[in-house]
Image: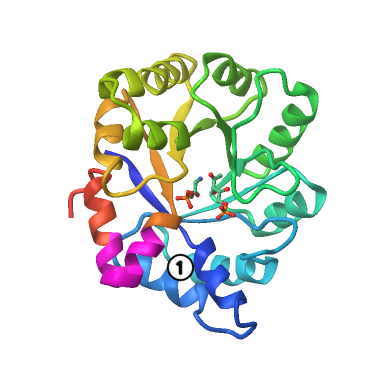
Amino acid sequence: MAKLSVNVNKIATLRNSRGGPIPSVVDAARVCVEAGAPGITVHPRADARHINFDDVQALKHLLDPWKAVEFNIEGDPRPDLLNLVERVRPHQCTLVPVRPGEITSEAGWSPDTDEKELRDVIARLRGHGIRVSLFVDADEKAVQLAHRVGADRIELYTQPYVHAFATSTAPLSETLAPFVRAATVAVELGLGVNAGHDLDLENLPDFVQALPRLDEVSIGHALISYALYVGLRQAVLEYREAAGDII
Ligand SMILES: CC(=O)[C@@H](O)[C@H](O)COP(=O)(O)O
Ligand SMILES: NCC(=O)COP(=O)(O)O
């Protein structure tokens, strides 16, 4: 079983497409938590293509009274984002590498990333009581990096699993093996295990079932897209069930 954290980036994408206030990110997040979602995730990118800093502050205000709901802010460790995270004090900050011009996340932190910068950023955020997760590929060396730089958790970048799930003729166990191994190493090192990117109702159950530990899955694009057909409350209920959260 894994806790579902709903990424509401794409609500802001739709909102920004017309330049007005609707749909409301806060109203959408409220529907999610009222449907029992244990977490809300946002990724306020430098270009503010969807979630902006005002959204983050408004979500913090919404979620504060919901003591059982976690707020997760993702992003690259740029100064303005770190200052925002220090002001907002979310439960978790997920550090994600960002490549110029990317449409979406394309990979986790490389195992040969400069450790000092990451270690200093992580110590700064943890000093405020914020749990830090490091976004990594399913690579033992990247998991070991996360441990060396003092992260509390890893977040496994699941797009390679999703792609193989949809296209590969190899046994599913082969597709899952790197993720199982990476999660096993993480547990051995005392790290928590999160996962995310392109997960959906089809590929999620097998992934949740296979890993030795999975604390959280953050899901946005597929869930919000599905909600366009069935409604946001129903989408959250189905995704909670697919994540193994007993409804
Ligand atoms: C880290 C991750 O895989 C997702 O949070 C992704 O970065 C979402 O960003 P977009 O919603 O801009 O695609
Ligand atoms: N960390 C992954 C996330 O927050 C949502 O990714 P996606 O489901 O929008 O691909």
Residues 76 and 163: in front is 163
Give the residue at x 81% y 49%: 79
Residue 241 lies, in percent from the top left, at 21, 50
Left of 229 or right of it: where is 195?
right
In the displayed structure image, the side of residue 241 where residue 194 appears, left or right: right
Left or right? Give the position of 145 relative to 62.
right
The percent coordinates of residue 56 (x first, y second) are 62, 65
Residue drawn at x 30%, y 40% is 203
Is the image coloured rainbow, by chain, by secondary structure, or in one colour?
rainbow
Is any part of residue 219 visible from this angle?
Answer: yes
Q: Quadrant of residue 172?
A: top left
Secondary structure beneath dot 1 equals loop
| Quarter that holds the C terminus | bottom left
Q: How crowded is mark 1: few (under 14 residues within 10 Å), some or many (20 or more)?
A: few
Reply above or below: 9 against 31: above
Image coords of residue 205 (percent x, y) = 24, 39
- Camera-side residue of 100 and 33: 100
Q: Name the residue at 53% across, 27% down.
A: 137
Q: In this view, does 187 lie to the left or right of 128?
A: left
Give, as a single range, the part of the protein colored magenta: 223-236
Residue 60 occupies quadrant: bottom right
Q: Closest to the observer: 106 or 1?
A: 106
Residue type of the residue flagged with mark 1? Pro
Residue under label 1: 65
Q: Does the magenta stretch include residue 95?
A: no
